[in-house]
Image: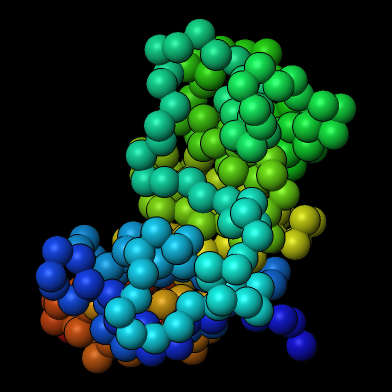
Amino acid sequence: MRNAVIALKNVWVRYNGSVILEDVSLTVHEREIMSIVGPNGSGKSTLLRTIMGLKKPFRGTVEVLGTPLRKTPRGLIGYLPQKSSADVTMPVSVFDVVAMARYAGKLLFERLTGEDLSHIASSLEAVEMSDFRDRHFGSLSEGQKQRVLIARAIAMQPKILLLDEPSTGLDALAQDNFYQMLLTLRDTIGLAIVMVSHDIGAVSSIVDQLACLKSRLHFHGKPADCLSNEALAAVFGKNMSYVRHDKNCDSCRGDE
């Protein structure tokens, strides 16, 4: 049985005096991809920030890799925010962008070591961007930029990768290629991946678990079990429908 790498138990979180997350309990296991889906303002990004320790619950517990979050060693969680902080106008190479992760823990003027260079190279290889290491980051396509930013996120060899709307701005082909890359990262380097998305149809064919969130969890389980119309209505509204983008679940369709 796979070990749990993230465990939330009865978590409640406030923001500016309002309750954003209500009684959320979920578990993510090693070598597993979970997608958190829901409309804007449903608490998805807050849930990621809670897992990272940036938001503290006023009730409930968060454990990462079997320990309370405050005791989790640095670097075990990689993160790609919804909007990248990388300035595409700066004359930085793909290598430089990924190297930022390795410099983060160093003193001023401290150089990269051979170990650092090895991890940068392996991260670029994992996302199939090794041939672009000397290319100007700003010259890349949106899909290529996302791959480089993923390489930066995994350059410290985390056990968990958190992604906030990572496919935003990608066309259909780039989106599909991006999701296939996530499957490869899960299977080859053993990452557990938690990905925020608003597109149930796009992610349901590649994830191991879906968590349907609107302050509370209204569905948490395997995509093959399919979301009920009741869960969809509770989260997205009664006129919501979705169609899975694979051939293995013709019945996975919600219509109101």
Q: Residue furthest top?
A: 91
Q: Residue 88 location in percent, x, y?
A: 42, 18
Residue sitting at x 47%, y 17%: 138
Q: Residue furthest right?
A: 114
Where's the N terminus, which quadrant? bottom right
Can the viewer see residue 247 in this picture?
A: no
- Asked if residue 105 is positioned above or below residue 39 in the image, the reply reads above
Residue sitting at x 65%, y 73%: 65
- Asked if residue 95 is positioned above or below residue 224 in the image, the reply reads above
- Please identify the quarter of the rendering in which residue 87 is found: top left
Q: Residue 184 location in percent, x, y?
A: 71, 54
Residue sitting at x 27%, y 68%: 43
In this picture, residue 119 sits left or right of residue 215: right
In this picture, residue 133 sits left or right of residue 214: right
- Asked if residue 159 is positioned above or below residue 100 in the image, the reply reads below
Q: Residue 221 location in percent, x, y?
A: 49, 85
Q: Residue furthest front?
A: 107
Residue sitting at x 14%, y 64%: 16
- Asked if residue 202 is positioned above or below residue 66 in the image, the reply reads above
